[in-house]
Image: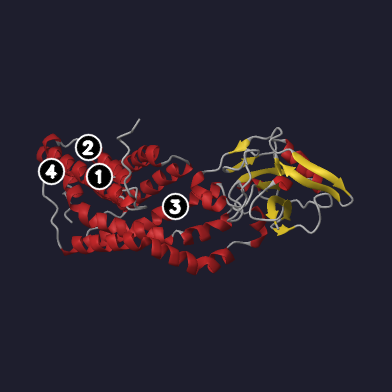
Amino acid sequence: MVDYHVLYLNPLMSLLLNLILLGVICWSLLSIGKNYYNGNKFVILGILAIIGISGRILMSPIPNVQPVTIIVILVGIKMGAKESIFLASLIAFSTNLILGNGVWTIYQAAAWSLIGCLATLLSNRLNSSIRLISFAGISGILFNWLVSLSILHVVSFDRLIPYILVGIPYDLLHIVGNITFMIWLSQPLIEIMSREHEIHLNFEVSTHESKTF
Amino acid sequence: MKSVSIGKKQIISLIVLVAVVITFPQINRFWLESTEEVRSSLITSENNTHYGLPTEWNNTQVICIHFPVADVTSDMSASKYVENRSYFDVNGLEILVDSEFENLVNFSETRTTGVCIGGFKNYSAGFDFMLDATNVTNGNLEVGYDESDFGPFVHTIGGLNANNLTGDFTGAYWSLYHNGVISEVGIGDLVMLENSVIVWEIATY
């Protein structure tokens, strides 16, 4: 028997295919999305979850380069801390079903949630694109170091700093990845999340205005 | 909705990202080489004997058996522990260690497969400890030895008789390490400390 499904792809080819797939998912989702927006937070959260989950899984050939961190930051700023905790936990759990589940899943969920909450706290200060980009970069390090704490289940405390030191090139990847995603995705994602505000403004007297970046 | 406007920032960030991703293996290797000394100096020496072992075994007595070196060509199917690392507690229950931490779990670079049994306390005679600890795996690690004038001489652990090994060497034997250094005395004369980690591995000559 010959299995015609077995076409061996080198890592670069499979990454390229993943990127094309991710592009198609994001493009079609964002294009059809506008027909279904009704100001419902759940619809917006669902769209962001799909982008985060497919983004993280399809970008997994490149370690630490994924859109989840900036999604939770932007959700923390534009929607709120609870929304970012929901997305962080949902994305961490569901992507790790494919990428590998373990004790680190709870650390990843917690680290992304914390970054989302920090973004909510600092939302008044994160009002320029340069500050937003800097925060995206810093949260890359923050995320990696928080998740590194999970090794303490297995090894003693004196291994932690050497372990973090070893990982610094991976921190660099996360920083550069976050900054790139922030520059590319902040505009369309804020656009999605701002729709809710516009609709609210139509129906009720509201003191909050949609922020522009 | 607005489409993404592609400006200078977008292009530069993408170029930087692609450059970092492409050069990542070189960056990573350079970083590992240049930080090696700093990293090893940061690890405190009192825990070194338990390096890579489950943390609940700190300050307890542990035995590890590592199965052979790369240049052995013999059939290794006699031992159950040649494929990966296994950890058992004093009751013979397996302790699962996340594969994510694989690089830290190695006792050393060459000792990538084998079995460790730990969590024991209050043993002072090395040979008693070895027999009791290997016994918890229900015979999978049975110890074969000859009595000699110098005490017991271990030739077989877990079905692997060192005398039967073949490969690119003259002969092979089970060699004994105590807390990271090769033991100067045989297992029959070895006096255990409260934090003793005993390692058996195949050596060749």
Badge nearest the viewer, 4 or 3? 3
Label 1: element kind: loop
- Contact check, label 3 and label 2, Cβ < 8 Å: no
Residue type, label 2? Lys
**Residue found at x 84% / y 52%:** B189
Upstream in the sequence, badge 4 or badge 3?
Answer: 3
Question: Based on the displayed image, in which of its 4 quarters is residue B88 positioned?
Answer: top right
Left or right of A174 in this view: A162: right
Q: Give the labeled residue for mark 4.
A: A198
Question: Based on the displayed image, in which of its 4 quarters is residue A134 positioned?
Answer: bottom left
- Contact check, label 2 and label 1, Cβ < 8 Å: yes
Q: Percent position (x, y) of residue A122?
A: 30, 55
Upstream in the sequence, badge 3 or badge 2?
Answer: 2
Circle 2 marks a residue in which chain?
A
Q: Percent position (x, y) of residue A183?
A: 22, 57
Q: Give the labeled residue for mark 1.
A: A79
Left or right of B6 in this view: B124: right
Same-chain check, marks 1 and 4: yes
Q: Give the labeled residue for mark 2.
A: A41
Question: Based on the displayed image, in which of its 4 quarters is residue A86 positioned?
Answer: top left
Upstream in the sequence, badge 1 or badge 4?
Answer: 1
**Could you say which is closer to the camera, residue B3 or residue B53?**
B53
